[in-house]
Image: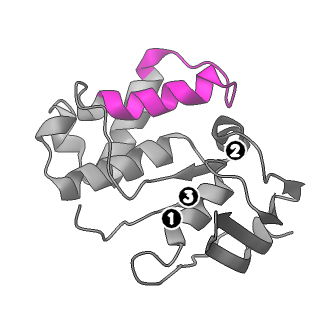
Amino acid sequence: MSLLVTEGLTKDFGGLRAVDGVNLVVGEGEIHGIIGPNGAGKTTVFNLITGYLKPTRGKIHFRGRRIDGLEPHRVVSLGIARTFQIVRPFTDLSVLQNVLVAWGHRNYYGLGPFKPFGPAKRKALEILEFVGLAERAYVGAAALPIGLQRRLEIARAIALEPKLVLLDGIAARR
């Protein structure tokens, strides 16, 4: 069974067609890229998959279940995480706290069993080590340069323990 399938995914904004009949098949363990110039609809495709927008036409299936039209928090609960083109860390929190917020999201929406804070902190530090931010765990997120804030976005996505991660604008300079 494929992890993600889109069929004829289309999104119109008034008279403008932003996404036109996109068909994707992503299998478990595969890496895919959506490439195109600014304004080509890449972020719109991600917004459709993750429930931030509803398609004009087409279907989206994740792990065999139809998900088009679901609210974003429901899509996350099924196992899809994403980063955003414009990085938005919780600037009043530390790098570690930002990852713990994502972990808390898993528990808030019933995505996993409740875990005591100690194990969560250890897991968050492991994730920060993986993305190269462990030495900055107690630094305020606002103090990170944009490139490291992007790594923090990835860490937050990983903390959700998703089946699929969508990386939007990962090489963008903003």
Residue at the disc numbered 1: 43
Which of pointers 2 and 3 indicates the residue nearer the eye?
Answer: 2
Q: Is residue 18 above or below residue 79?
A: below
Which residue lies at the image location 23% right of the left edge and 47% below the top edge? Answer: 133
Task: Give the magenta part as a residue range.
Answer: 97-118
Location of residue 34 in the rendering, given as x and y in whole percent from the top left corner: 53, 79
Give residue 165's mark.
Answer: 3
70 falls in the magenta region: no
Which of pointers 2 and 1 indicates the residue nearer the eye?
Answer: 1
Choose top left, top right, bottom left or bottom right for residue 55. Answer: bottom right
User: Which one is in front, 173 or 132?
Assistant: 173
Which residue lies at the image location 38% right of the left edge and 35% below the top edge? Answer: 99
User: Could you tell me which secondary element the residue under label 3 belongs to?
Assistant: strand
What's under tag 1, amino acid-wise? Thr
User: Could you tell me which secondary element the residue under label 2 belongs to?
Assistant: helix
What's the coloring here? one colour
| CA gap, disc 2 and disc 3 | 12 Å
Circles 2 and 1: CB distance less than 8 Å? no
- Report the quarter where the C terminus lies: bottom left
Residues packed near mark 3 inside 10 Å, few (<14), some (14 to 19) or many (20 plus): some
Q: Is residue 106 above or below residue 72?
A: above
Q: Is residue 96 visible?
A: yes
Residue at the disc numbered 2: 75
> Earlier along the polypeptide chain: callout 3 or callout 1?
1
Q: Is residue 28 visible?
A: no
